[in-house]
Amino acid sequence: MSREARPKPFLKLNDGLSLLQHALKRALAIPGAAETLTVTNRELLFSTVDEYAELKLPPSRRSFLLEPEARNTAPAIAAATSYVAETHGPDTVLCIFPADHCVGDVEKFLDAVHQAITLAHNERIVTFGIKPSHPETGFGYIEADGDRVVRFVEKPNLERAKTFLADERFLWNSGMFCFRADTMMSAMKTHCPDVLEPACDSVRSGRKGSGEDYNYLELDPEYFGQAKKISIDYAVMENVKDSAVVASDFGWNDVGSWNAMAELTDADENGNRTLGDVTAINTHNSYISAEDRLIGTVGIDNLVVVDTADALLVANRDHVQDVKTLFETLKETGSEIHKLHRTVHRPWGTYTVLEEGDRFKIKRVEVKPGGRLSLQMHHHRSEHWVVVRGTAKIVNGDQEMVLTTNQSTYIPCGNNHRLENPGVMRLVLIEVQSGDYLGEDDIVRFEDIYGRS
């Protein structure tokens, strides 16, 4: 369900909103929040902007910090802290929330944030601890003494997790934080200067830009690439002596496995949790998710079955943590499934691969109003475009044309071409590619309004 080009924060929940959209709504609900700063990969900027726009929220100050590559949470937080210290002052309080978590009770969450902000003003780095509801082996733990962190504990085995559940001092480590900018920068200067210094340099040397209702800063790739790849827990939290913890129970779920995803759906009388078109016979304690077609099960127990347009997962619920091993195996073997869905999101809209075979590929292309593909050419393929709905403004070699429903054009291999939607409704067309090589990397871009190379 999540791929490199469309990661977990974009997953839609049963209410139709994504994890990312819920995260933004929670952040904006914090009283006195001055601005939201989203740290993400450069390639995900426009998808993130589109997700935010879908919410139709009142205008607010929104900024983006764009990473050239993923280097774990410590460099990301270091860059964000440096940026906020420069733009808002060193005594500004930051709240750090991963964009792929669920929160069941927002009022309790906001109360915990208020407590954390109070502690942060007293120059303490604050983490959020979740009161355990079961012996979980997939989370790290925090041992607490009141609001003081005694120690962080690695993911335990089941027996140790049962011991932690019975001891009220132990909390799940949620991976959420609150601190003043100068407090975090001081701690990083002491404990991980190899993270802080290049991250700060990447902010100072970054490239600024803006969209219709947001600003962004692209971190300098040379400096950011020098920052040590390490989590904030290892780099800072385990080394700081006076960190604080706010203990709460606000229905937190990090959606870190298919079992965690299953908890977001109510179980039936047989312990099954299902989404989509599912017919389950003599089936128990299973999670079954159908995207576009019927899933029928007979005589199964304790399984996860997840069907998408281009991949099917079947796993024992006791082994769902090993899905990451499956992902890495697909990546190592060169399968594009680790990276892309059949429907791929682009700044201008989406394309869906309908069919692919020897020397041909058929796509459904949707361009949002005002969207414009880059002026480009291909070395190895030609393309036929047939407009299904809307209006297409097309550059094809030396020609410029406007096509409407049922009209088409042929683009020979090597021709410069561009597609644009000048209308107010989505443009839909069918693209038929033919040639010796049909990979997505056979693109030479000459002009692009989205700043892609």
Image (cartoon, helix red, strand yellow):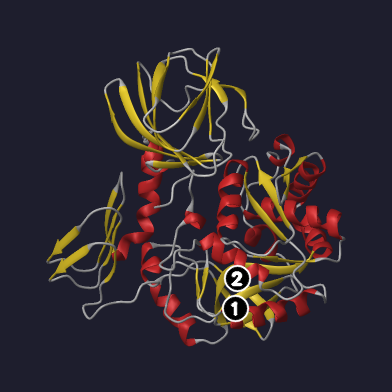
Q: Secondary structure at mark 1?
A: strand
Q: How many marks?
A: 2
Query: First in sequence: mark 2 or mark 1?
Result: 1
Classify 18 as above or below 425: below
- The spot of residue 394 in percent (x, y) is 52, 24
- The spot of residue 352 in percent (x, y) is 38, 39
Going 82% across and 75% down the picture, which residue do you hit?
Answer: 121
According to the image, label 2 marks what residue? 152
Going 20% across and 58% down the picture, which residue do you hit?
Answer: 295
Q: Secondary structure at mark 2?
A: strand
Name the side, left or right, on which 452 lies relative to 416.
Answer: right
According to the image, label 1 marks what residue? 143
Going 75% across and 74% down the picture, which residue do you hit?
Answer: 242
User: Which residue type carries mark 1?
Assistant: Glu
**144, 435: nearer the viewer:** 435
- Determine contact: label 2, label 1, CB under 8 Å: yes
